[in-house]
Image (cartoon, helix red, strand yellow):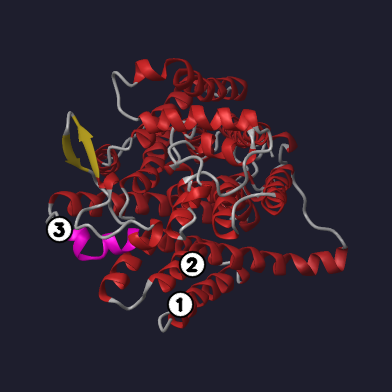
Amino acid sequence: MGDLPVAVGLVLAVAGLGFGLVLTERRVAFVGLLTAVLLFQNISVMALLRVGLVQAEGAQVLLAAKEVLLAAAVLALALRALPRLVVKGTVKRSWFTGVAIAWIMLVLLHAVASGPPWLPRLAGARAVVILPALFVLGYWLAPTEREMGRLVRVVFVVAGCLAVFGLVEAYVLPPSFWLSIGHEEYYQVKIGRPIQGALYGNMRYWLAGQPIRRVASLTGDPLISSYPMAFGLVLIAARYLQRRRFRYEHLLAALGVGAATLLTLSRGAVLSVAIALSLLLVAGRSRTLFALLTTTALTGMVVAATLFGQQLLRITSGAGHIDQLVEGLARGLQRPFGHGLGTAGSVATGVARSSGLGGVVLGGGDSYMGSLATQMGLPATLLFYALMIWVACRLYARFALALTVGLPHAWWYGATAAMLAGLVATSALNESGFGFVASGVTMVLAGALASPALAVPTVAKAHRGPARAEVVAGAG
């Protein structure tokens, strides 16, 4: 228990710093702080556990730093909105935030109504509200165009750092590196895995019976690290598709990040990039075609796994992903309101097992769609995916308009919308891409790009000229 006050103090210090940054409108600095917490929390906790500075309870507190930081930011934004509410009696409203908040309230109601004991139930609720909550955060942060450019650069820096460190730890440092800094102690705390002198299973990819080392990078998890790098790749590609000019340094960076992403052997991340780039190439400026293709990609994943799962397993591995999707949808159909939050999903099941509550687990974490259907039922699952596709399509509408009026940064909207669509489609067969660390920054940027502060003007040169531009209401 001696380490608990120290852990709580560190978390409160980080949250206090984030609160102050948001309150003083230092948006880029806040997102940078959030990104640093996401990238370094796992490896920091590993090291602290290894040297004995924290124990299991303290580690759990430190791992909650990102959620506490998010709560502190929302509180600061609420305090900033308070004077407007008091003076004018009104607050700014939007369909974007209204829908996201409605989903969060639905999840909270579901969490109160049913579920296993509170620890896994809370973990289950967190897993299905975190991405909409991050979208709302980005929307309320409402960065300026200049700040948005800096945030995009943050994504590039993150992708580059993950790629460089990932290649070094996988191919330069000795194989014992992760064990020496507390990899096993971390997973013992996180999911109750006993110490056994071996790396966690997903650090290796088994091909033809032979283990292949995967790039894990700063997060210590190949799957999680792959998605921020994937987003960086989509941003670079979208920039090139719009401007048709490639600098040599951009090409070298793209090759390095691409190689590191491939070497994570994360099929979900690679498929997300492939879907995102295909959408940018094929949909063009048509939001309707973008919506149709995104829905088709998601539906195709579900149909292929449901009808042809066994045939697919003859040419690829991943039985767990297919089984968890099919079984999860079946459970969601049998019980339209679900079995309760905390009965499926990697985070919730990890908490349940480490707490000795493994009996409440019905499904694993290999399919986000399957775990959501298990916990909340099929109707809620369909609603969630409809909302996510709607958000991506609204962003793509801004992209199309930005291209039409000639904004040089139109690619921000297109890349983010396409990456979000890729994440949505692949979440049918994986869960790792739909998490706080893996796609948290993507959702913050999606919310920021959807905000009125970055609504697309109708005049091509409005962003450069002194005159104020009229904003198309339909684009927001």
Image vertical order of residue 303 relative to residue 329, above or below: above
The residue labelled by disc 3 is 176
- Of the two numbered discs 3 and 1 on the same chain, state the one appearing first in sequence: 1
Does any portion of residue 442 appear in the rendered image? yes
Q: Position of residue 339 (x, y in %)?
A: 62, 41
Question: Which numbered tag is attached to residue 375?
Answer: none
Please state which amino acid type lies under the numbered disc 1: Leu
Question: 189 and 5: which one is in front?
Answer: 189
Q: Are marks 2 and 1 in contact (CB under 8 Å)?
A: yes
Please state which amino acid type lies under the numbered disc 2: Ala
Magenta-drawn segment: 176-187
Q: Nearer the viewer, mark 3 or mark 1?
A: 3
Does any portion of residue 417 appear in the rendered image? no
Q: Nearer the viewer, mark 2 or mark 3?
A: 3
The residue labelled by disc 2 is 65
Membership of 180 in magenta stretch: yes
Image vertical order of residue 266 relative to residue 222, above or below: above
- Of the two numbered discs 2 and 3 on the same chain, state the one appearing first in sequence: 2
- Of the two numbered discs 2 and 1 on the same chain, state the one appearing first in sequence: 1
Membership of 422 in magenta stretch: no
Q: Main secondary structure of the magenta part?
A: helix
Q: Position of residue 359 (x, y in %)?
A: 50, 49
Question: 357 and 98: which one is in front?
Answer: 357
C-alpha gap between disc 2 and disc 3: 28 Å
C-alpha gap between disc 2 and disc 1: 8 Å
Q: Position of residue 72 (x, y in %)?
A: 60, 68
The residue labelled by disc 1 is 10
Left or right of residue 18, residue 1 in this image = left
